[in-house]
Image (cartoon, rainbow, N blue to C red):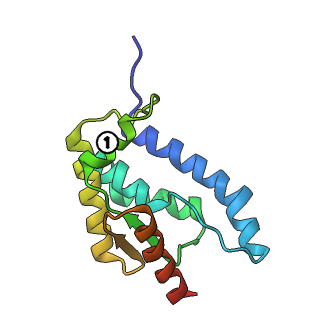
């Protein structure tokens, strides 16, 4: 039968993808003077793979040092949607991915991971649930304050 990969293997696959993104897109654009907006970064890896799947955070951070080569975001927006709301939204799509199909306990652990990260890092800005327009205004205000 089909075997699931280990959480560590899954983490390495995400890291490999991120390494290619850094090498081929992010670093060249930064070197050309662009501002880069990325929808997932290491915080997501730590929240999902460490808090959600139990992979050692120290191990993730050691692998990440090689992957991102010192790149750090100026700001991270955590769109803190209640777990059930997020899963309901995802459920409206026909093609749920492997992570979206995981148990509620996994998703609650991931959300707790994001909360823990946000409490440790000032660059992580929690954006509370709101409509699209209000969420946009909140994010734009923070961006204008930073830049």
Instruction: Give neighbour class at mark 1: few <14, some 14-19, many 20+ (Cα, 10 Å).
Output: some
User: In the image as oriented, which residue stretches furthest toward the top?
Assistant: 1
Quadrant position of the N terminus in the picture: top left
Question: Badge 1 is on which residue?
Answer: 87
Q: Where is residue 96 in the image (x, y as percent from the top left)?
A: 42, 32
Q: How many marks?
A: 1
Q: Is residue 17 left or right of residue 92?
A: right
Quadrant position of the C terminus in the picture: bottom right
Identify whether 113 is placed above or below 119: above
Q: Is residue 42 left or right of residue 113?
A: right
Q: Where is residue 4 in the image (x, y as percent from the top left)?
A: 39, 26
Label 1 element class: helix
Identify whether 146 is placed above or below 36: below
Q: Where is residue 54 in the image (x, y as percent from the top left)?
A: 28, 47
Of the pair 115 and 85, the residue shown nearer to us: 85
Of the pair 73 and 15, the residue shown nearer to us: 73
Residue at 53% across / 42% down in the picture?
A: 13
Of the pair 117 and 13, the residue shown nearer to us: 117
User: In the image as oriented, which residue stretches furthest toward the left?
Assistant: 105
Residue at 50% across / 45% down in the picture?
A: 12
Residue at 42% across / 68% down in the picture?
A: 135
Kindly indicate the quadrant of the structure image that contains residue 113.
bottom left
Residue at 47% across / 29% down in the picture?
A: 95
């Amino acid at each position: 039968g089909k075997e699931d990969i280990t959480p560590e293997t899954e983490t390495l696959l995400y890291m490999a993808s991120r390494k290619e993104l850094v090498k081929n897109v992010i670093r060249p654009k930064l070197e050309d003077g662009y501002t880069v907006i990325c929808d997932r970064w290491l915080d997501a890896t730590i929240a999902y793979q460490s808090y959600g799947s139990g992979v050692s955070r120290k191990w993730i951070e050691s692998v990440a040092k090689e992957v991102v080569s010192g790149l750090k975001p100026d700001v991270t927006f955590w769109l803190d949607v209640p777990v059930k709301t997020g899963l309901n939204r995802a459920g409206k799509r026909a093609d749920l991915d492997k992570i979206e199909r995981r148990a509620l306990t996994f998703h609650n652990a991931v959300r707790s991971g994001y909360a823990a990260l946000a409490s440790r890092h000032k660059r992580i800005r929690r954006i509370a649930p709101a409509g699209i327009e209000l969420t946009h205004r909140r994010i734009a205000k923070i961006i204008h304050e930073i830049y």
